[in-house]
Amino acid sequence: MDTNGNGHHENGKADTIPLFEADPVSTWDQADHDDARVNGIGAGQVPGVSPALSARFADYLDLKVGAVGRVVSSEKEPAGAHQFCFWARDDEVNLDVGHIVVTFSEEAAVIGVVDEPRRFSDLRSFLDDYFDRQLQESLHVAAPTRRPELLVFTVQVLATRHLRRDVISQRPPIGGPVFYATSKAIEDALGRDDFSGAAVPALMHINGNPQYDAAGEPMVDADGNIVFQRSPVALDEHYLVGPEAGHANWTGQSGLATKTSHALFLTSATFQTLRKGPERTSVAALMFNVKGPDLLWLDKPADPDVTDDEMVSAYHAAGVKGLTDLDHEAYRALGLEPEPFSGLRIFAPFKPGQVPRPNFGTGGGAGIRLDSLETRSALNTLRDARGETEGRVFPILWDLQPFLWVPHRIFDRADLDDKLFSFVQEIRDQQVQTLAGLEALFAEIDRHFAMEDDSGKQPSDWRGHHKFTIAKARNRFRGLTGKFGGLLADGAVEHGNAPKADAPFSDQELRVIDIANCNTNVQELIVSSIINSVWKMAEEERLGVDKLIVFVDELNKYGSGEGALRDTLVDIAARGRHLNVVLFGAQQFRSRVDSEILGNCGTSLYGRVGDEEIVNPAYRSLSDTAKAELLGLRKGRLLVRHAHFRAPLFGTFPFPPTMSGMKGQRVFNRSGTALGAGRCNAAAENVVSIGHPADGVWNLLRGVMGDKAPSKAEVRAQINGRLSAGQIDTLINDLQRQINEKRGNRMFKPWGWTQTRIATMEQQSASVPF
Amino acid sequence: MASFPYRHSTLSDAYVRHSRELREQGVRHADMRNAASLETQFSGGMGGLSAAPARLSEQLRRLEGADPILRMPVLPAAPGESRIAGFLDGSQRTVSAWRIGLVPVIATVAAAAVITRTPDGEAAIARDREGNTTLRMEHRWLIPLRSGDAQVDRLVQSITSAGGAVSDPVARKATINGEVDQPTYDAWLNDYSRLVEIAYDAARQVRVEVEMKLLDEWPKIDATERDWLIVDGRRALDVPRTLGVVKRVSSQYLTGAEAVQVYDLPVGHRTSAFVPNRDKRGGEIPYQGRSPHAVDANTSVMWFLRMHDHAGLDAYHGLVRVEAPSDTEDSADITSYSSWLLAERTPRATGDARWASLLYPIHLLERVLKRQIAAETRAWPNAS
């Protein structure tokens, strides 16, 4: 006997087998969405989601696209608080790594970044498929039944938002539908609600769902392709420039114009955000230009002023493409203006051999007053065109005094024994400030050694320093002008009204120290000296601004190993956020940067990383998928980690708002390119009026020969077409050394020696096969 | 007990020795060394050792002008040739719930569905022309209703009042000529083991009922009125455009040389067709609501088809028995149906030990059904 019960389930399971059929109720129209907002629950309830969650989080979900997959957890791969898996709807082909999705736990929305994709089938081994294929005539013949292949994504949880704002939930998601996250969800997941400072736009996240227009229709581009949802990724000001956390670090391969471009973009975004913020925090940045003209034209906009026909033509002629429509759209979406740095100031040392002659005082008291000099053409920077340097480019010139405080930097380690160190200290105690003063001291010491005592013996030491030590010191000091050519002046240096590279900053100032063309000795000395000065100002609260960003490229060069600069950088990383100095560092090899610096960075950004580098422990916190993505990351795309983000995420950024260095040279400094590389030749004669490298040789000859020196034109004529710019620098250094060593030697003929040397160098150059 | 004759050699050594002898003596034999051990094959028990002898070949009606049965080659259908569109299968899970005195209370969950394919081979649970899913589920309690035990009666009352369905497995088994034979019924009531066996048999019938309903509906499900449905196992009803594929050939129907023809059947060959002359099982047809076009399944036209090479394996490997509608007569049609089935050899159900005779869409459907049943029995100990 059978009884009729209600155990027969017909038509009731369609929603439990979505693998095999489209879910007819998984998509919403705008009316449904509005219902959810207005009425909370009922008509607008999201299918598969509880009424309470539907009502609270409906605006987190792209319901027009509908569910894109379902959360799965198994004994082997359970869903966790920080990671879970979901399988993707077969027809949602836009879903990919880096996209942000939303699903739910019992009482919370779980928002995460799509990570590793894996495609499963029920095939037990590859061989099985191979054997199957033996039954068919050709490989391209499809079997009558397609073996289901399930695409499963791992998701790194960005945030879990509970129904109640006072509850912090870490509960893993339960099996249920997964949706694309809306911009609102992404903003919340990135902790915008928890920001204590202003939101600094950093990247643009692109999701797999469409961007909708005001009518709620998916937007399409000119080619008819769907425009994907773009959401700004913002950083918390207080975690970027302090005081809660601070510092940012970029890593990635060189040559992709991503690290520096984004550092500039983020600096601009920081400037604009703080300027517009309610606290009106003053901010400045200090950068070191280490390559070509990279950072020399940051005051020039990426796009020309359209009302200036001449400028438009110049941009066009130089091949400057400017910002694209997408770039402008990105700036608008990020709430930024593509404006250049109006407060740019560039500091550079002189070209070797072109340190100006003293213009005040006489004898040992002679010195150089920088504010009364025309230095434009003599500075060792590629930005040297008339009209582009005034008020923008300023000299760095030191007399001997600061060198005496860093003997470990100016002398070779092998030379700097205790005896020499002690003698340098003696020089400091003697209040010697200039090379001329030092020469006077050596003359006095010579006189001391020339005197005989009562027994007729000459003294072997001076103030306890043996004469051999003093002879060694004299020799080394005389080599300094060659070693630090362009930076070290003979006489005293007075800035007068000329700005100083290590002076306090002004709001919105971007100070660029151009050391690109300097030798390594000069570069390292300037970087360490200025950073130490800035750090000292910060400790003394004399920065002049509320926040100072110090951008150091090639951080692995300065922020690793041992040394005072490395110690200072570690100190800045550790304490800088409290003293309002933040370090923006960039490098190709993150693994070679001191872990204390990296560990203190609140924000890390990753561009394309090489396979040799990415295996290092510095990347261990990234998932295998993220690492694999980094290996082939395209230009303009970065992975970002920030204090508020539980998981890293990818994003793009628009072209920086400023002119690139090379393009800037072409548009604003045409003569500079002619001098920047290759041989100087007669064709370049038309640009010598604004500086010529050979003038350094003439300056040296003039200094040692006075009126008997050859004319500037004569020197240029000897060099033009025979030596390259690099060879001229070498010549200047060699000549400086000769002058120092043979000072007082009447047999030394500087101009004759120079002409011989030019011929030798030309001959050597010609014999080197290209 | 006779002593083992190969005291100083292994069974494998003996096999080699005797194989050589068979070859030398010209004895025609098949190597089956690679077949699974019988313990593996019968791990679920004997399934009821049939007392009945194999049906005699003389009782068959041989078709295609072949007497005795012939073997003939079949080529797999080329892409696009096959008209197989649907696959029907069912599954069940039967669990013991309680024992009240000597009365076992058994519950079963049966599921069945039809799976169809899109032109590019993607499989999905089918819907009928009205858009209703073909996935069917049935919960059934299997309880003797004439136990005379008030506690059992109270349980039945409780289940039915909550909307549950209850069947009496003993009454079904003890029915003779439409009447329950009470002495037989009472005798079984005192045999707990027998009661459990009877309940299990009833549970299988529940699943068969669900399958048969779907089979009966195939003409309603198939919108094209030209596509064919493959039934996993016997065709319980003679519904047009349906083929039954019996994976485990327990009834060989043929004897003697004809049976040898079957077990020697090379891969890609079929036998000629035949029709059994009488109802194999006898007894009732469990599904009572069949449509007018569904007639007694035991009039099906049958033949054997070797899907995969069985060299070195047991004689059943890759051997299926195909059952076709009773009006099948044309030899070309039988060959076509066989070629359609041969084209289903790929992809293989590599995750299933029965892959050689299990069609992949059936395997897929089984997995879906098992998951559905698992969802219905979740948290039940030992049910998944």
Image (cartoon, coloured by chain):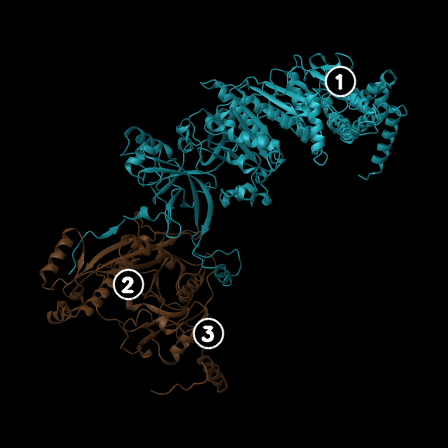
Same-subunit check for callouts 3 and 2: yes
> In which quadrant is the N terminus of chain B drawn?
bottom left
Crowding at dot 3, Cα within 10 Å, few <14 / some 14-19 / many 20+, comes out as few
Farthest residue toward the front?
A455
Q: Considering the image in quadrants, where does the C terminus of chain B appear?
A: bottom left
The subunit letter for the residue under badge 2 reads B
Instruction: Please identify, in this view, whether the residue under mark 3 or under mark 1 is nearer the observer.
Output: 1
Name the residue rendered at 34%, 33% in the picture: A58
Q: Are marks 2 and 1 on the same chain?
A: no
* Disc 2 residue type (three-letter): Leu
Answer yes or no: is residue A103 visible: yes
- Residues flagged by tags 3 and 1 on a common chain: no
Instruction: Provide the letter of the chain coloured cyan.
Output: A
Rendered location of residue B183, percent (x, y): 11, 71
Dot 3 corresponds to which residue?
A: B312
Instruction: Name the residue beneath numbered marker 2.
Output: B237
The first of marks 3 and 2 along the sequence is 2
Q: Secondary structure at mark 2?
A: loop
Amino acid type assigned to the residue bearing label 1 in the image: Pro
Tell me the residue that label 1 is attached to: A356
Q: Does residue A258 appear anywhere in the picture?
A: no
Q: Chain of mark 3?
A: B
Image position of A8 (left or right of A426): left
